[in-house]
């Protein structure tokens, strides 16, 4: 699109409309999910889609990217693990406290109506996956959700997933306190072997999985990526990188060797593209651009 | 229409240049920007030793302007060697290495290290408005200090041409450029960000940027940039190449800067408004205009406003 008029440029911009200037909103609800995990709600919609992120600003502390756990057109929810300076501060916040929000940024999970989807959620990756599940069910999708966590008390959103129609929940924990003792990818592996292999033999694809979606630790993503590639199932995975601006300027989240920015070409990356990112599963960059082992 | 030029012995396929501080932390990113059509790429400012930036928020934006106070983070010279060394293996478009330091002697040390890596140009960042708390007024705000840095860098840069990146936040940018020219500068990058400016969140009544203030860029600053380019071009009698930077979104913006005196056009914040394709789009828009208006060579536009004024007077 060639343009010689600024107003026209803005009006016809191919760049998604985003709020790039944070504005503070009072927290309307705080829910303790597990010992270290909370969900906060704001009575405002940003029109976010499942997989997208917002930048949450804690005035006087820092601003961090957070996956959207829900945006239903009226309220926005974010689920976070109190692990860093910002999230620990945020964990002290109560109803009425102000948090700055801008976004939504980045790509989102994409599916077709009636798809059979396998959702893989590790740790607090369960939050954005619940947003996917909630929306996909509305589109008549059938879901198998693989939720994994360190132990039973760290499992997130199990009740919420359980209430959704056409959704089967598979659970694993590292210590075996709930579900399979081990990784959720093991469950996914067994599941895909059951649903895809016999049908390859019979030629039927009636129950085949159309897409695999994953959000969680990078080691888990790496396993899902390999498995989906091996099974020839299209996959979409959410990649985490250090972000500053969120809309493609600072370059801090650019990945090797493609140079694409995860804030704009991600965080949800299709597996074909992800497999070309050679740093995936190996290293990421800190706030100074220095490589750090993943 | 061919927009290529040779400037100080370096060939540019088109006048668009990735401006410093944007997207340019890694060799992969420079290659990616080159693939999307940029005529050259500039590194983010390189320090001798690692330098932490400011906490977030560091970049905020509206349809009219962008404010940034990233605080010039960088991992130091080892990383620069690795990334520039990697890029120079295939070197798809010219690389401009931007260097920064806190003292004149550290500017010389950094420039000497980077010049060894054989970038096409050195660009000297004496004008960042975001580290004033740490280092005081930028060197670019004082003609003698700017000239001192220029002289020190020129003493160690060998054959690599040295561009001085100037600040618009002065009342005598022409004189400052003239001082740098006398000290041996080979060219100028005009301008760094404006201000600094501030934005306040209403409910919390807090400045949004963690640094409270930040450099202003984006479409709002283009007229200022055009004026500064014009001042520098006039003060140095059009003898020095200028990389015109500040609020360029379209081909027409770029052409206007060329008429004011720029040979190359830096684009940074423009990426936020038109995406990574902005370099190709701006180049195509320039080509279209030049073809329609019968421009034969892009060089004839550089400083053409000054020639026009001389004829009319």
Image (cartoon, rainbow, N blue to C red):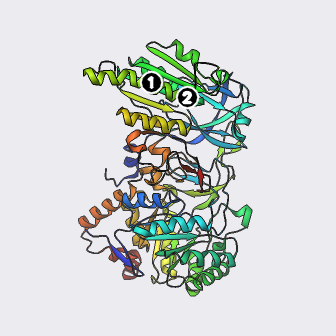
Marks 2 and 1 sit apart, C-alpha to C-alpha, by: 11 Å
At 62% from the left and 51% from the top, the residue drawn is B58
Mark 2 lies on residue: A183
At 27% from the left and 72% from the top, the residue drawn is B295
Q: Position of residue A136 (x, y in %)?
A: 43, 22
Judge left or right: residue A286 versus residue A169. right
Chain bearing mark 1? A
Snapshot quadrant of residue B182: bottom right
Q: Position of residue A288 (x, y in %)?
A: 62, 56
Q: Earlier in the sequence, mark 2 or mark 1?
A: 2
Task: Name above or below for residue B302 compared with residue A92.
Answer: below
In this orientation, does residue A130 appear? no
For the residue carrying disc 1, how many other residues have a C-alpha within 10 Å: few (<14), some (14-19), or many (20+)? Answer: few
Task: Name above or below for residue A82 compared with residue B263.
Answer: above
Element under label 2?
A: loop
Mark 1 lies on residue: A190
At 45% from the left and 70% from the top, the residue drawn is B88
Taking depth in this image into account, of B222 and B278 the one nearest to the observer is B278
């Amino acid at each position: 699109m060639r343009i010689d008029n600024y107003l026209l440029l803005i009006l016809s911009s191919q760049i998604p409309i985003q709020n790039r200037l944070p504005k503070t909103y009072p927290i309307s609800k705080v829910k303790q999910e597990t010992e270290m995990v909370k969900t906060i709600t704001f009575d405002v919609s940003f029109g976010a889609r499942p997989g997208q992120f917002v930048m949450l600003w804690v005035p006087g502390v820092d601003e961090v990217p957070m996956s959207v756990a829900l945006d239903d057109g009226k309220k926005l929810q974010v689920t976070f693990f109190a692990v860093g300076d910002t999230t620990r501060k945020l964990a002290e916040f109560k109803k009425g406290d102000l948090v700055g929000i801008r976004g939504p940024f980045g790509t989102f999970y994409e599916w077709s109506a009636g798809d059979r989807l396998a959702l893989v959620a590790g740790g607090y990756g369960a939050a954005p996956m619940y947003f996917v599940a909630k929306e996909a069910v509305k589109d008549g999708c059938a879901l198998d959700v693989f939720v994994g966590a360190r132990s039973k008390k760290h499992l997130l959103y199990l009740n919420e997933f359980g209430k959704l129609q056409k959704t089967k929940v598979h659970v694993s924990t590292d210590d075996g306190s709930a579900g399979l003792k081990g990784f959720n990818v093991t469950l996914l592996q067994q599941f895909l072997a059951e649903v895809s292999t016999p049908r390859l033999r019979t030629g039927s694809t009636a129950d085949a999985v159309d897409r695999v979606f994953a959000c969680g630790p990078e080691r888990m993503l790496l396993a899902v990526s390999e498995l989906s590639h091996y099974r020839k199932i299209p996959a979409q995975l959410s990649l985490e990188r250090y972000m500053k601006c969120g809309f493609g300027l600072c370059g801090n989240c650019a990945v090797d060797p493609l140079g694409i920015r995860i804030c704009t070409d991600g965080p949800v990356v299709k597996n074909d593209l992800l497999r070309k990112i050679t740093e995936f599963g190996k290293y990421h960059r800190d706030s100074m651009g220095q490589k750090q082992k993943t | 229409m061919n927009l290529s030029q040779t400037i100080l012995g370096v060939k540019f396929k088109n006048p668009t240049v990735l401006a410093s501080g944007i997207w340019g932390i890694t060799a992969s990113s420079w290659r990616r920007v080159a693939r999307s059509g940029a005529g050259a790429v500039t590194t983010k400012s390189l320090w001798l030793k690692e330098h932490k930036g400011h906490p977030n928020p560091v970049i905020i934006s509206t349809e009219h302007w962008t404010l940034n106070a990233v605080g010039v983070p960088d991992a130091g010279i080892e990383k620069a060697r690795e990334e520039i060394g990697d890029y120079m293996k295939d070197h798809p478009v010219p690389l401009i290495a931007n260097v920064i330091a806190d003292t004149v002697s550290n500017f010389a040390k950094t420039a000497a290290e980077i010049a060894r890596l054989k970038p096409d140009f050195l660009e000297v960042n004496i004008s960042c408005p975001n580290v004033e708390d740490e280092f005081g007024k930028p060197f670019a705000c004082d003609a003698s200090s700017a000239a001192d840095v220029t002289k020190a860098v020129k003493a160690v840069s060998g054959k690599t041409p040295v561009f001085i990146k100037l600040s618009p936040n002065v009342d005598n940018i022409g004189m400052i450029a003239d001082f740098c020219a006398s000290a041996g500068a080979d060219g100028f990058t005009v301008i760094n960000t404006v201000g600094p400016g501030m934005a306040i969140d209403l409910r919390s009544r807090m400045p949004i940027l963690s640094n409270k203030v930040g450099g202003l860029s984006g479409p709002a600053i283009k007229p200022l940039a055009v004026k500064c380019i014009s001042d520098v071009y006039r003060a140095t009698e059009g003898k020095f190449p200028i990389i015109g930077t500040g609020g360029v979104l379209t081909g027409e913006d770029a052409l206007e800067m060329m008429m004011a005196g720029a040979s190359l056009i830096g684009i940074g914040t423009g990426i936020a408004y038109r995406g990574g394709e902005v370099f190709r789009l701006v180049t195509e828009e320039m080509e279209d205009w030049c073809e329609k208006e019968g421009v034969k060579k892009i060089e004839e536009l550089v400083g053409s406003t000054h020639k026009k004024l001389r004829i009319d007077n």
